[in-house]
Amino acid sequence: MVGNAPWRWCERTVAMVRQAHRVLAADGGANHLARIGVRPEAVVGDLDSLRPGVRAWVGEDRIVHRPDQEHTDLDKALEYVAASGQVDEITVLAATGGRLDHAMENLGLLGRWARRGGPRVELLDGHHRISAVAGAREFATRGGQGLSLLPLGSCATVTVQGVRWPLTGEPLDLAGRTGVSNLALGERVTVSVTGGVLLVFVAHPPGW
């Protein structure tokens, strides 16, 4: 899935898109895909950011107009692909750059999808792979890899193992104590959360 935030392609992300099982765009995300010549199977949203030339290139048969203003285009696009019942995991590019209010909404959206179940949704930017944990999750890491933990609001208890500064059933609060800039010790980090949703930012390894 490609969103509409500012985005710079690199060799790795281009390859990721070209090898993906399915590729969709949230509104103007199709503009990013057009730059690398990858036509999405669907462009979903209110279409206010989709360039006319890109729309013509995509084709009207792949345009899914969703004018609803109660949900963001990314939310609409996630709903569209989840409704197919054919995906277990969705990686979203171009969701966190640009306007801060849009980035915060997309991080909140990540948390809402973690609570509802269904496909696992992750955001990918130039620095991190971002996941939301509303229960328990294991992350593949490398020794020394950066890891940050930010609650969406507050979490009653957070337990993190496999890091330099572990947590054992401790509360975190975005307006109080958070968990920025931890380090993985080895190949696995486990995170368990009760009473809230925790955003886990796993830094890309050197040379990513």
Image (spheres, helix red, strand yellow):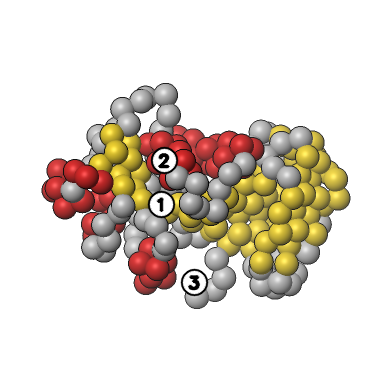
Residue visible at 75% across and 53% down? Answer: 191
Q: Which residue is mark 3?
A: 208
Q: Which residue is mark 1?
A: 1
- Graded by Cα atoms within 10 Å as few (under 14), some (14 to 19) or many (20 or more), the crowding at tag 2 reads some
Q: Are marks 3 and 2 in contact (CB under 8 Å)?
A: no
Which mark sits nearer the N-terminus, 1 or 3? Answer: 1
Q: Would you say 153 lies left or right of 168 here?
A: left
Q: Are marks 1 and 3 in contact (CB under 8 Å)?
A: no
Q: CA distance from mark 3 to mark 2?
A: 31 Å
Residue 51, horizontal then vertical, whole percent: 19, 44
The three-letter amino acid code for the residue at tag 2 is Tyr
Q: Is residue 202 above or below residue 101?
A: below
Q: Residue 111 is drawn in which quadrant?
A: top right
Residue 37, horizontal then vertical, whole percent: 23, 63
Q: Would you say 202 lies left or right of 16 here?
A: right
Residue visible at 30% across and 45% down? Answer: 43
- Graded by Cα atoms within 10 Å as few (under 14), some (14 to 19) or many (20 or more), the crowding at tag 3 reads few
Residue 159, horizontal then vertical, whole percent: 81, 50
In the current view of this chain or complex, which residue is farthest to the right? 168
Residue 130, horizontal then vertical, whole percent: 56, 53
Q: SS class of the residue under badge 3?
A: loop
Q: Nearer the viewer, mark 1 or mark 2?
A: 2
Q: SS class of the residue under badge 1?
A: loop
The three-letter amino acid code for the residue at tag 1 is Met
Viewer-proximal residue among 172 and 91:
91
Residue visible at 41% across and 63% down? Answer: 20
Q: Which residue is mark 2?
A: 80
Q: Nearer the viewer, mark 3 or mark 2?
A: 2
Q: Are marks 1 and 2 in contact (CB under 8 Å)?
A: no
- Graded by Cα atoms within 10 Å as few (under 14), some (14 to 19) or many (20 or more), the crowding at tag 1 reads many
Viewer-proximal residue among 52 and 166:
52
